[in-house]
């Protein structure tokens, strides 16, 4: 059992609109409360303390940092939720991964399902898995590490982590799927979200820079 020690600090608001609120989630903070009372502190609770009408749209893994959007009211929640469901929203993640990724860009199309005996872990399964698609672009190559941009087309649990492991380039600091590297956090950051404003329909681009 990993002890939950959520990071302290004030809420970082990235963009504020009449129908939405975009904030930056730090690594180590849950998106929503856990069942254990010790896991009550989370981004959703912190956001609603400052914006009581805020409603959840999507989640990030506890160890992932980056941009999250909340709806301001039920109407906006339905509108934004449909955008995620219909893949109107575009997402870009940044990651540092093990090894030197040879292909400059590629598409990973591997089905994912929960590894029930070992949940919350997920696994590749061609028989029962749900389709999962990720594109990646190599930004930098080092001797032992590569920096990549990741573009998920589906939203399976742990998708980016499982896909990068499957091609032999586990994300650094991954305590679920990693190989024991010395990174002090998961090197995965939701850098950018692009969506339509529920009020008026104009495109909104929100981004944040990772610490790594």
Image (cartoon, rainbow, N blue to C red):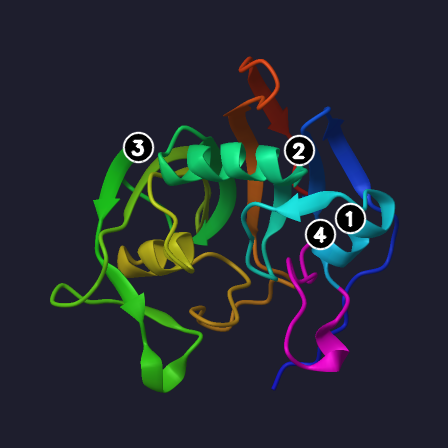
Mark 1 and mark 3: Cα distance apart in space: 38 Å
Q: Is residue 33 magenta?
A: yes
| 161 to 55, vertically: above or below | below
Mark earlier in primary sequence (1, 4):
4
Measure the C-alpha gap from mark 1 to mark 4.
13 Å
Alpha carbon separation for disc pair 4 and 3: 29 Å
Which class describes the residues within 10 Å of circle 1: few (<14), some (14-19), or many (20+)? many
Gap in angstroms between the C-alphas marked 2 and 4: 11 Å
User: In which quadrant of the rendered view does residue 46 lie?
Assistant: bottom right
Nearest the viewer among 119 and 149 is: 119
Going from N to C along the chain, the mark reached first, 3 or 2, is 3
Question: Is 117 a magenta residue?
Answer: no
- Which numbered disc, 4 or 3, marks the residue that appears first in the sequence? 4
| x then y, percent, for residue 188 | 54, 50
Q: In the picture shown, does residue 35 fall above or below 109?
A: below
Q: Position of residue 201 (x, y in %)?
A: 53, 15
Task: Assign a secondary structure to mark 1.
Answer: helix
State the residue position of label 3.
104
Quarter of the picture containing the C terminus is top right
- Please give the label number shown on residue 26: 4
Dots 1, 3 in contact, CB < 8 A = no
Please say if the residues under marks 2 and 4 sit with CB atoms less than 8 Å apart: no
As measured in the structure, the alpha-carbon distance from the residue carrying label 2 to the one carrying label 1 is 17 Å
**Dot 4: few (<14), some (14–19), or many (≥20) neighbours within 10 Å?**
many
Q: Magenta stretch mostly in which secondary structure?
A: loop
Q: Which residue is mark 2?
A: 208
User: Could you say which disc has been placed on residue 47 in the image?
Assistant: 1
Mark 1 or mark 3: whose residue is earlier in sequence: 1
Left or right, 93 with reference to 157? right
**Badge 2 vs badge 1, beta-carbon distance below 8 Å:** no
């Amino acid at each position: 059992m990993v002890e939950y020690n959520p990071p302290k600090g004030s809420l970082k608001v990235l963009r504020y609109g009449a129908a939405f609120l975009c904030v930056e989630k730090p690594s180590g903070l849950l998106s929503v409360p856990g069942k254990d009372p010790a896991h009550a502190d989370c981004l959703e609770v912190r956001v609603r303390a400052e914006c009581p009408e805020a409603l959840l749209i999507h989640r990030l893994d506890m160890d992932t940092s980056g941009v999250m959007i909340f709806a301001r009211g039920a109407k906006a929640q339905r509108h934004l939720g449909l955008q995620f469901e219909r893949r109107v929203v575009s997402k870009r993640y940044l990651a540092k991964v093990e090894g030197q990724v040879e292909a400059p860009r590629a598409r990973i199309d591997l089905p994912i399902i929960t590894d029930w005996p070992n949940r919350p872990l997920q696994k590749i399964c061609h028989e029962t898995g749900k389709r999962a698609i990720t594109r990646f672009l190599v930004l930098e190559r080092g001797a032992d590490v590569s920096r990549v941009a990741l573009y998920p087309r589906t939203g399976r649990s742990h998708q980016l982590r499982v896909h990068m492991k499957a091609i032999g380039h586990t994300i650094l600091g991954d305590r679920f799927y990693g190989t024991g590297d010395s990174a002090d956090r998961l090197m995965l950051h939701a850098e950018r979200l692009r969506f339509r404003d529920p009020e008026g329909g104009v495109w909104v681009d929100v981004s944040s820079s990772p610490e790594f």
